[in-house]
Amino acid sequence: MTRQMNHTAPAVLGRARELVEPALRLAVGKLADPQMRLIAGYQMGWCDADGRPTEGGGKAIRPALAVLSAEAVLGTADCGIPGALAVELVHNFSLLHDDVMDRDVERRHRPTGWVVFGDGQAILAGNAMLTLAIELLAEWGLAGRRSLPCLLDATQLLISGQSQDLRLEQAEAVELHEVLAMESGKTAALLSCASSIGALAAGAPEHIVAGLAAFGEELGIAFQLVDDILGVVGDPAKTGKSSSSDVRAGKRSAPIVAAMSGDSRAATELRELFSGEPPATEADVERATQLITEAGGLDWAVREADRRLATALEHLAGLELVDSAAAELAAVATYIVSRDR
């Protein structure tokens, strides 16, 4: 597996964070319950478990896409900001809940929400963030009414994707097309929404909205494939998760299933390692990681992520957009597929 990694995030991610984060902090500050405000702030990376301010936070990919989708049709970011807030809240709602269900103990280089606050409180905080996202768009007049169905549809697909993910973890046999369908819901649906919600709010023509949504859908699959690769061979110092985290959890991610689908000796041995409980010992984890590479799972995932990126950029190139915003959308897409964290 070879890939040129891009360690430098495009400037638009920082610009989007500067535009969105103050409004996002104000929105979270309106949550009625102080415990929900604390957990939401912790999840966003703004504070520690005691509420003391910290430096941190996500990559702002979804907010950047939402802002750029508005700029791509209007030339200004204003119509994209409420959608960016809503999408980021839904994303973090899903992370809080997923970490509980997956029993992940570390995210962004610190303990996950349920580890710090308990399962119940983390679930409730996720519910509060989801409700807040809907409230933001419901109160936003015509632009919000245009945007809300997109957010709700994406959320339903996201929930369905997580349900499929849990089911696949328990399945004896998993097909690659099932994994990709799951990832389409779990990850790509929200990136598709983020990539089109600003244009939708701005009243862009239907074909522009559809084209941006298709761009986001393909980008979302590529994004998840890169996450899957990092879940096998990512550097924990950069990813914020344990080494070979997906292998340890026994996940049926795309590169793992692709590796198991062959008829080579490595694929056969890998199927045996994943036939029951997740790899139990450190030696088993190391061996499984080696076999995923030998059986071609990582190489397949790299090629497929690159193919999805190319398709996403083709969708983008076919639209009549503001040139500067289209260039920044392409830069974000390229960064997503070449990142190492």
Image (cartoon, helix red, strand yellow):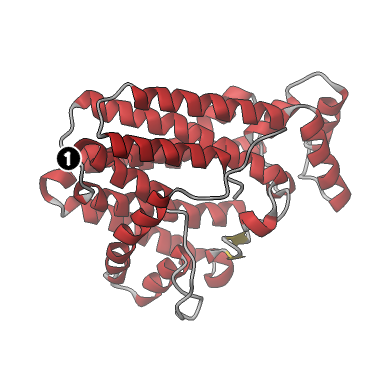
Identity, as a three-letter code, of the amino acid under mark 1: Ala
The extreme top residue here reads 263
The one nearer the camera, 321 or 299, is 321
The extreme front residue here reads 324
For disc 1, the marked residue is 202
Please say if 281 is above or below 262: below
Residue 47, horizontal then vertical, whole percent: 46, 74
Side (left or right) of 174 relative to 278: left
Please say if 44 is above or below 264: below
Q: Can residue 160 be seen at all in this image of the molecule? A: no
The residue located at (77%, 44%) in the rendering is: 277
Q: Can residue 277 be seen at all in this image of the molecule? A: yes
The one nearer the camera, 135 or 143, is 143
**How many numbered dots are placed on residues in this image?**
1
The residue located at (29%, 24%) in the rendering is: 319
Side (left or right) of 143 relative to 238: left
Side (left or right) of 30 relative to 236: left
Residue 309, horizontal then vertical, whole percent: 49, 29
Residue 54, horizontal then vertical, whole percent: 48, 74
> Residue 109, located in which quarter of the rendered image?
bottom right
The residue located at (57%, 40%) in the rendering is: 338
The one nearer the camera, 20 or 324, is 324
Q: Secondary structure at mark 1?
A: loop
- Quadrant where the N terminus sits is top right
